[in-house]
Structure formats: structure tokens, C-alpha cells
Amino acid sequence: MTGEPDERRPIVVEGEAGVGRAAALLRSGGLVAFPTETVYGLGADASDVDAVRRIFAAKGRPADHPLIVHLPDAALLDAWAVEVPTAAWHLAHAFWPGPLTLLLSRSPQVPDVVTGGRATVGLRVPDHPLALHLLREVGRGVAAPSANRFGRVSPTTADDVVDELGDAVDLVLDGGPCRVGVESTIVDLSGDEPVVLRPGGVGIERLAAVLGRAPAAPADPAPTSGAPAPGMLPAHYAPSARVVVVEADAAPTAAAELAALGEGRVGLLAPTVTEGLAPDVLELEPAGRPEEYARVLYGRLRQADRLHVRWLVCVPPDPSGVGLAVRDRLDRAATAGGASEA
Ligand code: TXA
Ligand code: MG
């Protein structure tokens, strides 16, 4: 950002200095974007129905997409959920604070506007010092989706939030770039067995180690319409560029063929340097191993858009750990087909 006066620019405050003001705004019904270890969230007091409605308006998000409630401490789980199973306590103990969201049977006082009228509520304790400080200061649950316009790429820096939301947010708390870079893993614990609705910052292998068995994948991970969202839509997390996902050995040919269409600039994102690329293909800086790939993924997608890339060929990382979440997001971006209005 240039720092020049801009009437669409919200107040941005760096670090601990902004926490008191952010907490006061949240307590009085304001919208505050804040950093977490995964992506930036767009927060409102989860018990304030009007404030939560403002989140949906700011994002352009349909009301049937529920919000995750952020808590400062696992001890508050009981206040928001009922019939909390032992597995939830085990997972909370193992991974909170951290990039894991638990879906549990909601307590009666959770407003319908937060859960989209569902029987479950998503809860998480984020692992970021500013987020935790803010949540303690607010002293209430903070409902927060990712701080992007609906269907678009999640923000991983304060500048990304400003680009996405402008002054639709009252204040942006700047905590620097997010460490994990993709959203939390969502595990539904409200049924008979744990189901992973969204792969994320906590790898499936680590969940399985704590649960004593591999969690199930959702029965229908890709609903084709805008019907009630069981975690997410197939076409989500989309840059303006059209994303094509291919394995490494197919990348040079895929990129050359797209370049030959003459429809616009072709870019490439891969874990390592790709040999044998056609000279007119724009190679983005390699994204590295799964953890590094996750951290830089959304920034690279935004960079591709800034560079007016029309087709972005993406070679996914190894699917272990957070690599599975990176593959999931690339597949969703590819499904969206570019310039999503979702
Ligand atoms: O890492 C994260 O989870 C970030 C940070 C800010 O915490 N938050 C985030 O929120 O990614 P959001 O709203 O962008 O994505 C949460 C997803 C949405 O697809 C939503 O529909 C789903 O979780 N979700 C939330 N509560 C749910 C519930 N009770 N039942 C089914 N899906 C739910
Ligand atoms: Mg989101």
C-alpha cells in the first residue's frame, strides 16, 4: 500500500498497539479484521446478531454459510457446545491453540445467524499472539470467516485484507504475514464418527494419531449448487486467473499448449524450478515443500492476478501434511474457472 489518503482505506494498526482499540470496536458492534496463524479473519462479536449480519454484508456471503467462533481458550468450549464428546477434548488438547476447527452440537445460546440455523457450531482457538490477546480482551466469542469477498482467495497479509474489503471493515489489526497460510482443518464431531470437512493446517496423519484411527472424508465433498454448505463449495478460493492443475512432468507441455492458444499470459507455479519451459511462460518463484507452499500459496495466486496471468498452471506439492490442503485449494480454484462470482 502507498499510505496515501484513500477514502476506501480502513484504519490499519500494527501489532499490540491496536489490540485495545480493536477489542473496544468488537465489543460495540464493529467489524475488525485480525491475523490468525492460518489466514486473516473478519471478526464480530458472535453474540451480537447485527454485528454478525454486517460480516455477511461486507463479504457478500450468503446467509446459509455458517461462521467459525474463535475462542481464547479451550475451557470455553462448554459454553458454546453441548454434548462435547471425549474426542473433542483430546483434539482440543492436542492442537489448540492451532489450525483446527471442531464442529460440535451448538449450545442453545449460539445465535442462528452464526450457524446458518444448523445444529452444529464451529469452534477454534487460533495460534497467533495478537488474536489470542484480542480474544482475551474482548472476553466474548468472536465469529470470523476469512477476511475476503465471498468465493475469493483468503488474505494472508493486512494489505490483502485492505484490497479485499476496503472500508467495509472498521479496523485491520496488522500482525504481519500468516505463518500457516491456508485455513484450518475442519472436523465434524457431531455424528457417530469424526469427519474431515476441509483439509487444512493440521494434517490428517496428526489427527489420526490422536483419534486412534483415520477420520472419515465427507460423503459428498462437492455439492454442485449453492445449497447449504457442508464446509465449502467446490468452486472456492479462486483467483481471477484460470487455474490448471497438472503433475510436474506434464507441466511444460500443458503450459506450452495454453500459451499457443494466444489467449493471454500463461504462468506456472510449482514446488521446484521447472526445466524445459517455453520462453513465453512466466515462472513464478517456486513454492517449495508442502509447509512453505501452503504459506506462499495465496500470495502467489494474488501475484498471478497482479501480473495479469490468464492461465496459471499449478504443480501441487506432495499430499502429506498440509500438502493435502494445498491440493484441495488448487483443485477448488481450478473448478472455479477463473474470475469467480461465487
Ligand atoms: O482458518 C480458518 O478457519 C479461518 C480463520 C479466520 O480462522 N476461517 C475460515 O472461515 O476459513 P470461513 O468462514 O472462511 O470458512 C469456514 C468454513 C465455511 O465454508 C463454512 O461454511 C464452514 O466452515 N462452516 C462453519 N461452521 C460450520 C457448521 N456449523 N457446519 C458446516 N460448515 C460450517
Ligand atoms: Mg473463507
Image (spheres, rainbow, N blue to C red):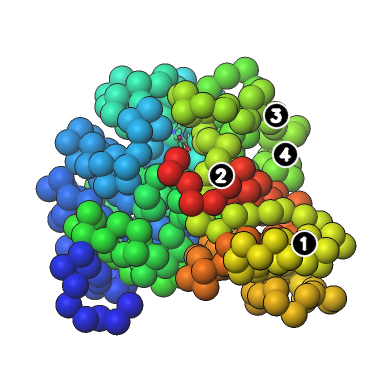
**SS for callout 3:** loop
Lateral position of residue 160 relative to residue 327, left or right: left
The C terminus - image quarter: top left
Q: CA distance from mark 3 to mark 1?
A: 38 Å
Q: Quadrant of residue 4?
A: bottom left
Q: Closer to the observer: label 1 or label 2? A: 1
Decide if residue 323 is in sight here: no
Q: Residue at x 60, y 66 (%)?
A: 264
Q: CA distance from mark 4 to mark 2?
A: 31 Å
Residue under circle 2?
336
User: As shown in the figure, which amino acid type bears the numbered disc 3?
Assistant: Ala
Q: Closer to the observer: label 4 or label 2? A: 2
Residue 274, image x, y percentages:
80, 73
User: As shown in the figure, which amino acid type bears the numbered disc 4?
Assistant: Ala
Please tell me which residue lies in front, 61 or 197.
61
**SS for callout 1:** helix
Q: Which mark is residue 216?
A: 3
Please tell me which residue lies in front, 303 or 139.
303
Q: Which mark is residue 208?
A: 4
Decide if residue 108 is in sight here: yes
* Callout 4 touching callout 2 (CB < 8 Å): no
Respond yes or no on whether mark 3 lies under 8 Å from ligand 1: no
